[in-house]
Image (tube, helix red, strand yellow):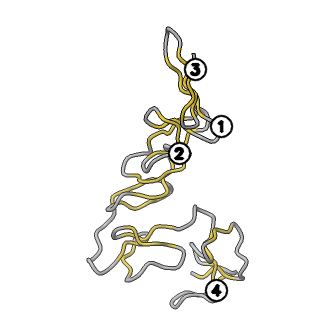
Amino acid sequence: MSNSFGGCVRQTSSQASVLTCNPNQYISNGQCVGSCPSGFFPDSSSRQCQTCSANCVSCFSASYCIICNTGFTMQGGVCTASSTCPSTQYQYNSACVSSCPIGTYTQGSQCQRTCPANNYYLSQICYITCPTTLRTNEACVSTCPNGTNNTNGVCA
C-alpha cells in the first residue's frame, strides 16, 4: 500500500513504513522538504537533512560551516570561540572593526562572509572571478578601500 502526500510517497508494508521524497527534496523530521532547516544540510547520498557541526547555524556539510552561532567565528569552515570586541565594534577575522567590510554582513557581533570561500561579492552576486579589476578578500571593488593598497589586483 502506498499513500501520497506533500511531494512524498509513504510505502507501507507489514514490516515498516518507508518515506521516499521527490528527487529535489530531503527528509527532515519525517517529512519531505525542499530545503533543510537552520542547523542542517542536505545530504545527497542519504536524501536526508543532516546536522551541522557544533556552534554552526548553516553549513555545506558536517565538516564545513558557513555561518557560526553568535560568539563564534569561522576559520576554514570550523566555528571557534571568538575574542570579545567592545560593544560598538564587530569581530572581523581576528580584529575588531567599527563596521563590517564590503562582502561581509553583520551577524550578532561578528562580520560573516556573504559568499563562500574563493567567491567574491558584487551587487548581490557571488563571483568566482571578479568582473572588476580589483578585489578584497571578500568582494569585487572598483577602487581599493581606505587603508589598503593594490597588489596584483588584490587590495590588502
3 or 4: mark nearer the eye: 3
Residue shown at the point (64%, 86%) measured from the top left: 150
Decide which of tag 3 and tag 1 comes sooner along the chain: 3
Q: Are marks 2 and 1 in contact (CB under 8 Å)?
A: no
Q: Amino acid at mark 3?
A: Ser
The residue where tag 4 is placed is 150
Decide which of tag 3 and tag 4 comes sooner along the chain: 3
For this view, does 69 lie left or right of residue 153? left
The quadrant of the picture occupied by the N terminus is top right
Q: Amino acid at mark 4?
A: Asn
> What whole-number distance in Å separates the C-alpha atoms at marks 2 and 1?
19 Å
Q: Amino acid at mark 1?
A: Pro
Residue shown at the point (63%, 42%) measured from the top left: 24
Secondary structure under tag 2 reads: strand
For this view, does 53 lie left or right of residue 85? right
Task: List x then y, in percent, for residue 131.
Answer: 73, 77
Secondary structure under tag 4 reads: strand
The quadrant of the picture occupied by the C terminus is bottom right
Q: Residues within 10 Å of mark 2 (few under 14, many from 20)?
A: some
For this view, does 151 lie left or right of residue 147? right
> What whole-number distance in Å separates the C-alpha atoms at marks 4 and 2?
35 Å
Q: Are marks 3 and 4 in contact (CB under 8 Å)?
A: no
Q: Amino acid at mark 2?
A: Ser
Task: List x then y, in percent, for residue 36.
Answer: 50, 46
